[in-house]
Image (cartoon, rainbow, N blue to C red):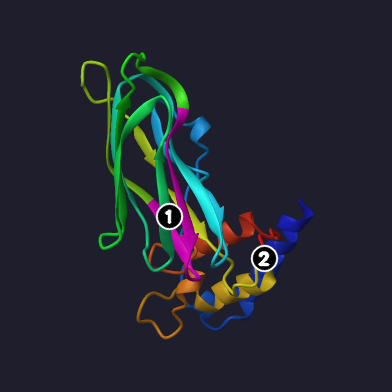
Amino acid sequence: MFRSAALSIFLITLVTCTSGSFLGITAEPAADITDCKLMQGTILYVDPSVTLLPVSNISKVNVAVADVVDLFGFQFYFGYDTTILDILGVAIQFPFEGSYEINETGGYVYAMGIVLIGYPTFNGSAPLVSITFEAVSLGGCKLHLYDTNLVDSTLNPIPHTITDGWVFGDVDGDGKIEIIDLVLVVKAYGSYPGHPRWNPNADTNCDGKVDIQDLVLLIKHFGEHYL
């Protein structure tokens, strides 16, 4: 509680001291980062939702399903930034079998699977595919699920919602989230590609602009070390 309050005061001070009333930008509402467990119905999501990863380190995320009934098969595209990540491996998880494609030119992984022969359709929550990658440069990268499809035993689509994920390192690359990272985001606040203050490392949520959502993401992980 004290840390959050102190950070809030610090950010307000930065905003006040920055020319143009926070660089002349009106802050947008922070993204609603919703816990998948609180959402209703079947969900296809990236787990964990946020991965802190320094350059040259390797990590893994799962594309998982929650609260599904009678799942026979799936397919999805998993988009990523090839300048930030290098995909090292993909694995379809039991009780599914299938195939995948890593397309570095298009910046995506395509994966599909069906339940193994002799096994019943799947009910519940579980990872469908694991994806291993290495960070090759500083910056943030959205892990974007799109063109997704879940089908039941009659090959009818299963309605579902999608939750993407993010990978990011600290802004200055020293292996920890601290005050200097917040300062760098504030300095780049309101910028976008081509803007004189643009800093791609400060765009922690990979949406092409530096705004309040990038600050929120850093504050949520403030004090974390990952080297």
As for residue 138 lying within the magenta part, the answer is yes
Give the magenta range.
126-143
As for residue 43 lying within the magenta part, the answer is no
Q: Nearest the camera: 1 or 221?
A: 221
Q: Position of residue 221 (x, y in %)?
A: 64, 56
Residue 13 to residue 101: above or below: below
What amino acid is found at the position of numbered circle 2 in the picture? Lys
For disc 1, the neighbor class at 10 Å (few under 14, some 14 to 19, many from 20) is few
Which circle marks residue 176 in the picture?
A: 2
Residue sitting at x 40%, y 32%: 43
Which circle marks residue 88 in the picture?
A: 1
Residue 178 position by quadrant? bottom right
Q: Position of residue 186 (x, y in %)?
A: 56, 74
Label 2, label 1: how far apart the Cα atoms are: 25 Å
Q: Nearest the camera: 182 or 115?
A: 115
Left or right? Give the position of 33 relative to 105.
right
What amino acid is found at the position of numbered circle 1 in the picture? Leu
